[in-house]
Amino acid sequence: MADVLLPQIDGVEATVAPRRGRPPQDSRVQRRRILEAASEIIHAQGFAGSSLDAIASAAGVTKRTIYALIGDKAAVFKAVCTESVASVASIPFPSARPGDILEETLTYLASVLMEHALSPQLVALSRVIMLESQRFPDLAQSILESGRETMHAGIKSVFVQLQAQGVAHFEDLEGGAEAFYDVVVGNRGFRATIGFHEPFPSEADIRRRVAIFTRGYF
């Protein structure tokens, strides 16, 4: 069958073979809708309580489309988890500037980390991963390690800037980043994941935690 001629665009006549599938852009949009719908359903009902039928209905696609673009329910779950973890990289880690005060920069950094750790999206994801860790042990370990590494790398980047500005000296950047997270955030994210309902830490509490870190580390 002959190619189909399309209208000229910017003076260039385009041709395309007879219909052999949806345009790539359409596929990307559909995949995004599928993952958004799957994320809401899986976070609310867990892996066992979710179904491809429900995800397809919420996304406005067919099950066949889900299989073609992502795969079966396990593949959809893995894709949802992987994309959710990518949000860690979007944390707005602060930038140290000349004249910044150490305590103020670390307090802002601590607030950013706390907001991320206690965000409803991350708590919901952590809960699902915890519940499904026996079913997907490799995925759970990979996600936890990736999130931890990304978090520590962001903290270290702030430390490096503070050190470059002469505000502080960190003999062990890796250990310092790990200690900072453990002191200022600790297990609050884990407690939220298992159902503890606690108020968000006050600024005074965050400053107290930062003071504990600075006095102990330096």
Image: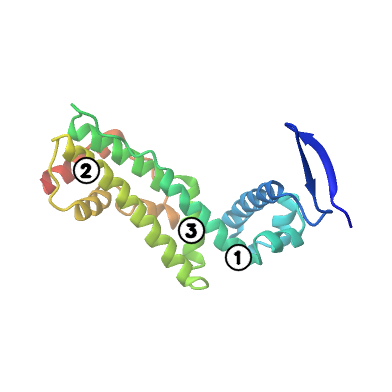
Question: Outermost residue, top direction?
Answer: 99
- Residue 81 or 11: which is nearer the viewer? 11
In primary-sequence order, the first of circles 2 and 3 is 3
Secondary structure under the numbered disc 2 in the rendered image: helix
Q: Counting other residues with Cα less than 10 Å from the Cα at mark 3, is it few (<14), some (14-19), or many (20 or more)? A: some
Q: Which mark is residue 75?
A: 1
The residue where tag 3 is placed is 127
In primary-sequence order, the first of circles 1 and 2 is 1
How far, Cα to Cα, is label 2 from label 3? 33 Å
In the depicted structure, whether residue 211 falls above or below residue 45: above
Query: Residue at image x 61%, y 61%?
Result: 76
Query: Residue at image x 73%, y 49%?
Result: 23
Q: Quadrant of residue 91?
A: top left
Q: Mark 1 or 2, which is nearer the eye? A: 2
- Residue 177 or 120: which is nearer the viewer? 177
- Amino acid identity at mark 3: Arg
Instruction: Say whether marks 1 and 3 touch (CB < 8 Å).
Output: no
- Amino acid identity at mark 2: Val
The location of residue 141, given as percent across then percent down, is 41, 67
The residue where tag 2 is placed is 160
How far, Cα to Cα, is label 1 from label 2? 38 Å
- Amino acid identity at mark 1: Ala
The location of residue 65, given as percent across then percent down, is 74, 58
Q: Counting other residues with Cα less than 10 Å from the Cα at mark 2, is it few (<14), some (14-19), or many (20 or more)? A: some
Q: Quadrant of the C terminus?
A: top left
Q: Quadrant of the N terminus?
A: bottom right
Q: Is residue 209 visible?
A: no
- Residue 20 or 17: which is nearer the viewer? 17
The location of residue 90, given as percent across then percent down, is 43, 43
Q: Mark 2 or 3, which is nearer the eye? A: 2
